[in-house]
Amino acid sequence: MYQGESESTGCTILLVEDDALLRPLVSEVLRDEGYTVIETRDGAEAIEVLGRSGESAPIALVILDMSLPRVDGLGVLQHLAQLGTSTPVVAMSAVVSNLVAAQARGARDAVLKPFELERFLEVVARNCVDTAS
């Protein structure tokens, strides 16, 4: 299902990525940068975690792949809109039109795959709000 938590900067990231090779790599890089990471494989798991996010550390940023099984990225964005949450979302996709659609539906930022690690980390740092303070 999902895994998580490591040393925290106060910024908890929900990483929603179905690619079994990419997800652990991105998660490890984020943890190495000091972020707490919760991983999910699809949109349905992401919605489940988001529904419980107030129970522990609130989610400060969602990194959301747009092409997901069960519930796609647009479905997750729709769920966030229904919750009325202001949690920032960084959309990821190899398809530009998916990123345009995501930003039209509320994603704050977008990263085109394959991405350069430095650029990706800049986008994360810009969008991750420390919820511990």
Image (cartoon, helix red, strand yellow):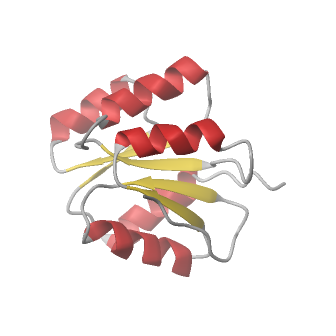
Res 66 seen here: yes
The quarter holding residue 45 reads top left
Q: What percent of the width, then of the height, locates residue 7?
A: 67, 77
**56 displayed left or right of 1:** right
Res 88 seen here: no
Q: Which residue is painted at 26% across and 44% down in the image?
A: 68
Position of residue 1 relative to residue 7, above or below, is above
Residue sticking out furthest to the right: 133
Residue sticking out furthest to the top: 82
Q: Which residue is painted at 74% across and 52% down in the image?
A: 56
Position of residue 72 relative to residue 116, above or below, is above
Q: What percent of the width, then of the height, locates residue 14?
A: 51, 53
Q: Which residue is painted at 60% across and 36% down in the image?
A: 51
Position of residue 28 relative to residue 78, above or below, is below
Q: Image quadrant for the C terminus? A: bottom right
Q: Which residue is painted at 22% across and 43% down in the image?
A: 67
**111 displayed left or right of 106:** left
Residue sticking out furthest to the bottom: 32
The quarter holding residue 52 reads top right
Position of residue 47 relative to residue 39, above or below, is above
Marks counted in the figure total: 0
Q: What percent of the width, then of the height, locates residue 117?
A: 35, 72
Q: Nearer the viewer, residue 73 or 9?
A: 73
Q: What percent of the width, then of the height, locates residue 47?
A: 48, 37
Q: Nearer the viewer, residue 118 or 3?
A: 3
Q: Image quadrant for the N terminus? A: bottom left
Q: Nearer the viewer, residue 102 or 55?
A: 55
